[in-house]
Image (cartoon, helix red, strand yellow):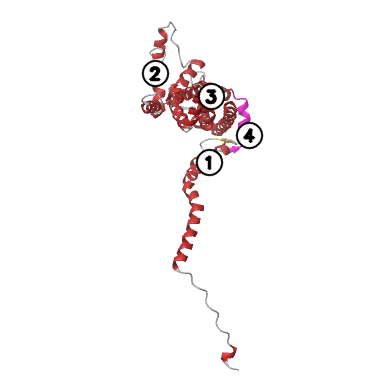
Amino acid sequence: MSLSATTAPPSPAAPTPPPARRHRSRSSSLTRLDLTYSPYLYIAPFFLVFGIFGLYPMLRTAWMSLHDWNLIGDHSFIGLDNYAKLVTDEYFWNATFNTFGIFLLSTVPQLLLALFLANLLNRTFLRARTLFRMAIFMPNVVSVAAVAIVFGMLFQRDFGVFNWLLGFVGVDPIDWDAERWSSWSAIASMVNWRWTGYNTLILLAGMQAIPRELYEAAALDGASQWRQFWRITLPMLTPTFVFVVILSTIGGLQLFTEPLVFANGNIIGGDQREFQTLAMYMYELGIENLNTAGYGAAVAWAMFLMIALMSLVNFLLIRRTVK
């Protein structure tokens, strides 16, 4: 038998795609990979920084709160004993009472005033609106330490401006840092002065996102300015207002610098702890006292849980009230 009779003919080779098609296929694959993974690469730096400076300290603090820990390095596991101790700690409850008292005196008037000013600055008839918007934000630019120092001088007993003004109406000089109500009022005034403008601009931005056609239609229907504000502005402003309330809650319950500088660096907040906040008490235990770092960590986590709970309550309350 001949070789040519037994050998099968070779199969035809697969056609090679043209270079342009191969290039388009490779480009399409790279585009899909870019759309799939590049967003995660863009946000990765935030989560990396948050993990190092946010998440890890939180987990470390939680671990410390379960130990009898000092800053020298000695520690022993005691479970939930630090949290059980909080229940009977009068200084902890005093700091909690002070924190919530100052929070109410500062946050509630601050938000109401910010809402009023934002609505005023949103009016079209107001002249020099840009100038007013810049001016109202200026207090937030000033250092919080400088604000506390200036207000501390204004609230001095013998040479303070406020006592001097009260003297014109026959009120005796007030020792502002000696009583609970007076020290709360002084600290709350600092917080209100510094943060009202900041919240005003956030609320103003939310108001400017509301379509003007809604107000024009309401005006044609005979709705007054107050009715427009209550029926249009507030419902449409709910997401922004909830954000401002939660932000103010977080900041108000972490109050530290203003009362500390008002007390001239006295971490206990007055002679009888009249205005020591939770943040100050945590610092006293965790930093100044080397032997109670574990207990200070428990105070930090108790404060974290309070902030989370208050933020949730405010969120639900605002949503229900505005609706």
Label 2 SS: helix
Q: Is residue 235 left or right of residue 191?
A: right
Q: Residue furthest front?
A: 220
- Mark 2 residue type: Met
- What is the quadrant of residue 298 in the picture? top right
Q: Position of residue 101 (x, y in %)?
A: 54, 21
Disc sitting over residue 153 in the figure? 2
Q: Which mark is residue 55?
A: 1
104 in the magenta segment: no
Q: Which residues are magenta?
A: 76-89
N-terminal of the pair, mark 3 or mark 2, is: 2
Q: Which mark is residue 80?
A: 4
- What's under tag 3, amino acid-wise? Trp
Separation (CA) of disc 1 from disc 3: 41 Å
Q: Which residue is mark 3?
A: 230
Amino acid identity at mark 4: Leu
Closer-to-camera residue (316/190)? 316
- Element marked by disc 4: loop
The image quadrant that residue 315 belongs to is top right
Q: CA distance from mark 1 to mark 2?
A: 39 Å
Q: Are marks 3 and 4 in contact (CB under 8 Å)?
A: no
